[in-house]
């Protein structure tokens, strides 16, 4: 299965995420899903037992792990 937005191959966790009300599959990778969630809250059902480190790492922004104090010139 592939993401409907960016065409990436979905992990097992991403491919089993469903809309909680309609029951339809969402078919979005973690990055695209988080972008959609930022704009509107989608109630979802997912299989937490299928989460892998790839699913968790996909949600990190490149600059998210940097300490803002370390980036300042002192």
Image (spheres, rainbow, N blue to C red):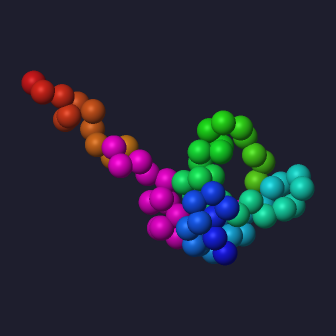
Q: Answer with the quarter of the image where residue 37 lies.
A: top right
Direction top: furthest residue: 74
Q: Answer with the quarter of the image where residue 30 lies.
A: bottom right
Give percent across and percent down for residue 50: 62, 72
Q: What residue lies at 57% left-to-right and 60% top-to-bottom?
A: 6
Give percent across and percent down for residue 46: 72, 62
Give percent across and percent down for residue 3: 63, 64
Q: Is residue 13 visible?
A: no
Magenta stretch? 45-63
Q: What residue lies at 10% left-to-right and 24% top-to-bottom?
A: 74
Please state which of residues 65 and 49 is positioned toward the viewer in this rendering: 65
9 to 41, vertically: above or below:
below
Q: What residue lies at 54% left-to-right and 54% top-to-bottom?
A: 31
Direction left: furthest residue: 74
Q: What residue lies at 57% left-to-right and 72% top-to-bottom?
A: 9
Label count reads 0
Q: Is residue 42 visible?
A: yes
Give percent across and percent down for residue 10: 60, 70
* Residue 72 horizontal side relative to residue 48, left or right: left
Task: Tell me, yes or no, whether the highlighted magenta stretch contains residue 18.
Answer: no
* Residue 58 horizontal side relative to residue 5, left or right: left
| Quadrant location, the N terminus | bottom right
12 to 74, vertically: above or below:
below
Task: Tell me, yes or no, whether the highlighted magenta stretch contains residue 54.
Answer: yes
* Residue 60 horizontal side relative to residue 24, left or right: left
67 to 16, vertically: above or below:
above
């Amino acid at each position: 299965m592939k993401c409907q937005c960016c065409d990436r191959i979905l992990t097992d966790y991403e491919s089993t995420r469903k809309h909680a009300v309609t029951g339809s599959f969402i078919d979005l990778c973690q990055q695209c899903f988080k972008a959609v969630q930022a704009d509107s809250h989608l109630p979802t059902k997912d299989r937490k037992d299928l989460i892998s480190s790839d699913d968790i790492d996909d949600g990190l922004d490149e600059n998210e792990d940097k300490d803002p104090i370390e980036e300042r010139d002192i």
